Amino acid sequence: MKALKWIAIGIATLLIIGLLIPEKIMIPVQGATSKDWNHNTFWYEPWGRSGVHKGIDIFGTKNTPVVASTSGVVIFAGELTRGGKAVAVLGPKWRIHYFAHLNDYSVSTGDVVSINSQIGLLGDTGNAAGKQPHVHYSILSLVPMPWLFTTQNQGWKKIFFLSPHKKLTIK
């Protein structure tokens, strides 16, 4: 029973520390500005097989460097059916920053990345094949935020997703 208590205290401490780490976020495509994505596409529907668009697509020239939008640990670097070549970074506040449709990636699972360090190249892989090169960028919170719940289609999932547009345009 004592071991269980110490494990619970350790997990709670780790969770609190993760929430206290300051979060700094930047646009993940080198040279891009807020003019390089449609500001109304977060939670836009209908959006293919996923129903709603849980991120934004930042457009640019193929092979433009894609950089870590925040510091963190790479928890996935590989290929997905719809996302193509993709990278996921666990950053401050227990948030996963997901980058999909990369032409290539230059990090591996377990790598520690700093904000603005290159993680890949802009592309059109996965279900973006043949479309204008872009990175699909989503922010998923592992800590639910019930106040974000809406009655929209899949609105209950909004308790886990933050609008990248809002996070990137706050100054």
Image (tube, rainbow, N blue to C red):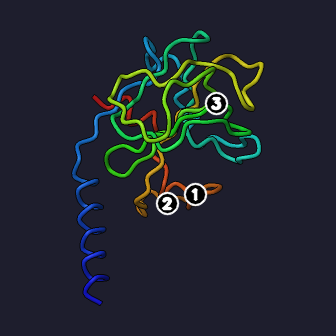
Q: Position of residue 133 (x, y in %)?
A: 65, 17
Q: Which mark is residue 81?
A: none
Circle 3: element type? strand
Circle 1: element type? helix
What residue is rendered at 23% in x and 65% in y?
13
Q: Which residue is mark 1?
A: 155
Judged left or right of residue 34, residue 151 is right
Frontmost residue, 128 versus 154: 128
Q: Which is nearer the N-term, disc 2 or disc 3?
A: 3
Give the distance between the C-alpha atoms of the residues marked 2 and 3, in whole angstroms: 30 Å
Q: Which mark is residue 149?
A: 2
Vertical order, 131 against 115 (above or below): above
Q: Answer with the quarter of the image where residue 114 lies.
A: top left
What residue is rendered at 43% in x and 11% in y?
31
Badge 1: few (under 14), some or many (20 or more) residues near its Cα, within 10 Å? some
Locate the N terminus by quadrant.
bottom left
Q: CB of mark 2 within 8 Å of CB of mark 1?
A: yes
Give the distance between the C-alpha atoms of the residues marked 2 and 1, in whole angstroms: 6 Å
Frontmost residue, 35 versus 9: 9
For the image shown, how many numbered marks are present on the structure?
Answer: 3
**Of the residues shown, which amino acid type is indicated by label 2?**
Phe
Vertical order, 49 against 68 (above or below): below
Frontmost residue, 22 versus 45: 22
Q: Which residue is mark 3?
A: 85
Q: CB of mark 2 within 8 Å of CB of mark 3?
A: no
Frontmost residue, 123 versus 108: 108
Q: Answer with the quarter of the image where residue 30 lies.
A: top left
Circle 2: element type? loop
**Of the residues shown, which amino acid type is indicated by label 3?**
Lys
